Amino acid sequence: MSKLDKLQRLDLLGLVPQNQVTPLVHLKLDEDEGDRDWPDSLKAFYNEQLARADWQRYPPGQTDLKRAIAEPLGLTHEWVSLGAGADEVLRHLLMAWALRGTVIYPVPTNALYGLTAQCLGIKHVAVMLNADFTLPVEQVIATARLQEASVILIGNPNNPTGNLFSRDELLTIVRETACLVVVDESFIDYSGLTLADVLEEHDNLALLRSFSHAWCAAAFRLGYLLGSPRVVAELEKVRSPHNVSAAALLAGQVMLARPAAFRDHWQGAVHAREALRAALSGVRDVVSWPSAANFLLVGTTLNGEELAERLLTRGIAVRPFSRSPLMNCIRVTVGRPEENAEFVAAMTAIFGPAA
């Protein structure tokens, strides 16, 4: 018997590490990253600025980047908390606001919601979305009241289903519950729907955002939360000092100062997404759902993991699902037109053309 046996957390025994490495493939569509790199001119400007930084020093203060995020929204920097990716911000949020309560979230959704709560030892309760992936507003409210929930997490657009919930639905939950309602707007630049304009009206509303997707900056691991100064102040207490690197802080400043460099990507991704949906309609036994993000949920007659393995033999990585209600589904990131065409060709080879 090991001395560690009495110390090990039994609730973590069944978990699999999340930092699994994707096998070497030539077409990587299993993550939700942007489909292109930064323009060369922007990279050159960034590298010039980074070369001037004092690399032997800890990262500078975060206030300048917080202001750059907040001021276009008519807010002050006290409304922003930064993290090394939206997942770290989520962890800070649950540490600060949910350790004594319950976390509620509709499913299927981002697996990190439940996983982060579980790793922190926080009770978490899932509410099943309707069969068409719409939001069961009354059930979310009732469950939050029954469980005396502290936090409700809702992705909008939802990941992996890609659909949007309406402002009215979300604000009804904000008004009708005694919870901190966190709306994950990580894919806002593809959808355009935000609740930022009503943040000052609801102190129990917060928004989670990321630079990883639409800003093509996943390598920097930079995310943030928008919320009332009272909410943000508690996050600032639990985050580690210097949690965001100097390289990421500079990247955020550069991106926000030059949003035009990314607008073509946002528009192109939306057009490519709709073109991919149209092309998949020509594949037998394949269905895809409408999406407001840079990915599609695709259903077939095969188990998701089996289909992912077949695609992997062709050098294509996708995100599979193996449990109900997404048992026969994969999530595919929208790539460049030639990448999407290769994916459709592989799906056609597996399933055949539609009649």
Image (cartoon, rainbow, N blue to C red):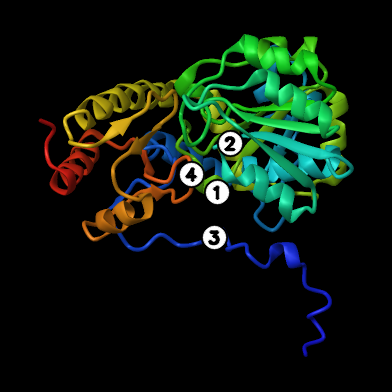
Q: Is residue 47 left or right of residue 206?
A: left
Q: CA distance from mark 2 to mark 1?
A: 44 Å
Q: Is residue 86 visible?
A: yes
Mark 3 burial class by Cα count in 10 Å: few <14, some 14-19, many 20+? few
- 142 in relation to 300, above or below: above
Please identify, in this view, whether the residue under mark 3 or under mark 1 is nearer the observer: 3
Q: Quadrant of the C terminus?
A: top left
Q: CA distance from mark 4 to mark 2?
A: 11 Å
Name the foreground residue: 192 vs 151. Answer: 151
- The residue tagged 2 is 107
Q: CA distance from mark 4 to mark 1?
A: 50 Å
Please identify, in this view, whether the residue under mark 4 or under mark 1 is nearer the observer: 4
- The residue tagged 3 is 19
Name the element at disc 3: loop
The label on residue 51 is 1
* Dot 4 or dot 2, earlier in sequence: 2
Q: Is residue 47 left or right of residue 98?
A: left
- The residue tagged 4 is 324
What residue lies at 54% left-to-right and 32% top-to-bottom? Answer: 254
Q: CA distance from mark 4 to mark 3?
A: 24 Å
Q: Is residue 26 visible?
A: no
Q: Quadrant of the N terminus?
A: bottom right
* Dot 3 or dot 1, earlier in sequence: 3
- 138 in relation to 315, above or below: above
Please identify, in this view, whether the residue under mark 3 or under mark 2 is nearer the observer: 2
